[in-house]
Image (tube, rainbow, N blue to C red):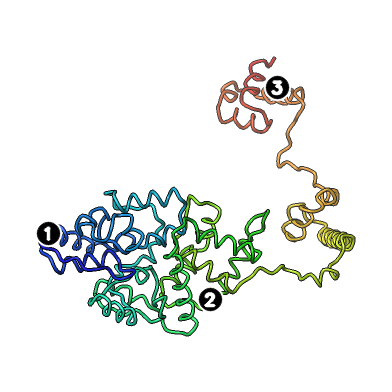
């Protein structure tokens, strides 16, 4: 079968080369691979129509072996910058030779997942590709997820193919701050895509976090402080609405911070780039400046203020008890729950000694606790009855047992042993 193999433009994707090959041949294998790639939501690593071993066989290895294509015509370097060495090798094997659809690279959450980005193009880059190759080329850094502008020229992407219409529809309203944030994010991700070392972006992020004071050399990450500064720095948002949703309500930041501590749970390169974007403008500042340290209260002053507060609470409780003399302990506690809770947590021994006196227990029916007196009462009740049938009635026996406060077994025994 006759095939026309075009020379690849710089940074051209394997997907774009597959489209150019399918437009000039009737090879069913090439056309089938391209049709399946268009039916999928996103290509492999957003840049490959099929496994790279199959791509090299279809192109007769004109662009090199699968490893060369992986490094030059895909976004593999972008993901490699956030993966460990072992995970990077596993991803390489999966993209080049495996038949499984799932990959071990980090993905985006469901609200932020996008479509095929082959149909997005920068006007400046399009002119360069037409001059060099005579055709439209899709470039690797144009296929980075959630980008709205070319990282090199800063131009908005134009729609040249309907497969990317979903990406255009996700754009937010224009503002200078959003444009600046989107362009800067693209520049950081472009640096990631040109990296050839594993975990380079993660190591760079850890270094900046340590330099800016959010990650002490011996200690835990200052999570709350960095979260506050991060959200404030990126509060203006981005031109892609999915990025704004991901930052505010889709849990982007906890996952990105967790990846700094656990390399086996890597975060998406866009999430790491967002951390670096925020670190460009934020820096940890202690809650109290050094020149105000002399004005801090000493330990003695703090202890004295705590003792004064304890005396105040005790006086309030004594006044409360004096004004509610007829209340029980439970009623006194419910009338002032905040005061009782404070004393119970911080001065429980004193509170127990200054409760309202307990009331004597009053039973609704008197019970005889002396066995001899109970026995005497039962025997007298039985002797006073002249009717034998009356004594054997269950209702009478039940009332007599209840009035004496006896269990059934003791009552039966007393009746049996009566003289």
Kindly identify which residue carries mark 3. Answer: 379
* Quadrant in which residue 163 is drawn: bottom left
What distance separates the C-alpha of mark 3 from that of mark 2?
A: 89 Å
Q: Are marks 1 and 2 in contact (CB under 8 Å)?
A: no
Residue 124, image x, y percentages: 34, 82
Horizontal side of residue 401 vs 18, given as left or right:
right
Horizontal side of residue 89 vs 52, given as left or right:
right
Q: Nearer the viewer, mark 3 or mark 1?
A: 1
Q: Quadrant of the C terminus?
A: top right
Say if 220 sits above or below 253 in the image: above
Q: Are marks 3 and 1 in contact (CB under 8 Å)?
A: no
Q: Which mark is residue 406?
A: none
Q: Which mark is residue 235?
A: 2
Pick whichever of labels 1 and 2 is earlier in the sequence. 1
Secondary structure of residue under mark 1: helix
Can the viewer see residue 322 in this picture? no
């Amino acid at each position: 079968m006759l095939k026309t193999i075009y020379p690849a433009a710089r940074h051209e994707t394997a997907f774009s080369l597959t489209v150019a090959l399918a437009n000039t041949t009737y090879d069913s294998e090439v056309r089938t691979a391209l049709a399946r790639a268009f039916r999928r939501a996103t290509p492999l690593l957003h840049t490959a129509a099929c496994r790279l071993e199959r791509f090299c066989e279809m192109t007769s290895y004109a662009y090199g072996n699968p490893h060369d294509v992986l490094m030059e015509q895909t976004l593999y370097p972008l993901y490699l910058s956030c993966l460990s060495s072992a995970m990077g090798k596993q991803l390489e094997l999966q993209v080049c030779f495996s038949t499984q659809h799932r990959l071990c690279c980090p993905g985006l959450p469901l609200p932020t997942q996008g479509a095929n980005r082959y149909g997005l193009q920068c006007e400046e880059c399009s002119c360069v590709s037409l001059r060099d190759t005579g055709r439209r080329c899709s470039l690797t850094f144009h296929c980075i997820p959630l980008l709205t502008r070319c990282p090199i020229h800063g131009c908005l992407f134009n729609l040249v193919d309907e497969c990317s219409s979903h990406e255009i529809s996700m754009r937010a309203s224009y503002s200078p701050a959003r444009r600046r944030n989107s362009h800067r994010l693209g520049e950081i991700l472009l640096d990631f895509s040109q990296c050839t070392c594993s975990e380079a972006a993660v190591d760079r992020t850890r270094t900046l976090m340590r330099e800016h004071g959010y990650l002490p050399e011996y200690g835990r990450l200052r999570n709350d402080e960095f979260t506050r500064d991060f959200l404030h720095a990126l509060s203006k948002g981005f031109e892609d609405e999915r990025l704004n949703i991901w930052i505010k309500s889709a849990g982007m930041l906890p996952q990105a911070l967790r990846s700094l501590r656990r390399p086996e749970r890597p975060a998406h390169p866009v999430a790491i780039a967002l951390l670096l974007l925020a670190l460009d403008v934020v820096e940890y500042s202690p809650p109290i400046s050094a020149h105000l340290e002399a004005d801090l209260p000493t330990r003695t002053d703090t202890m004295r203020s705590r003792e004064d507060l304890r005396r105040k609470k005790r006086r309030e409780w004594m006044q409360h008890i004096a004004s509610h003399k007829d209340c029980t302990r439970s009623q006194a506690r419910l009338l002032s729950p905040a005061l009782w809770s404070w004393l119970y947590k911080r001065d429980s021994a004193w509170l127990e000694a200054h409760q309202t006196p307990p009331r004597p227990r009053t039973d609704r029916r008197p019970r005889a606790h002396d066995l001899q007196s109970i026995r005497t009462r039962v025997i007298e009740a039985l002797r006073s009855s002249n009717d034998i049938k009356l004594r054997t009635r269950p209702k009478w026996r039940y009332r007599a047992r209840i009035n004496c406060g006896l269990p059934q077994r003791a009552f039966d025994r007393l009746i049996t042993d009566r003289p």
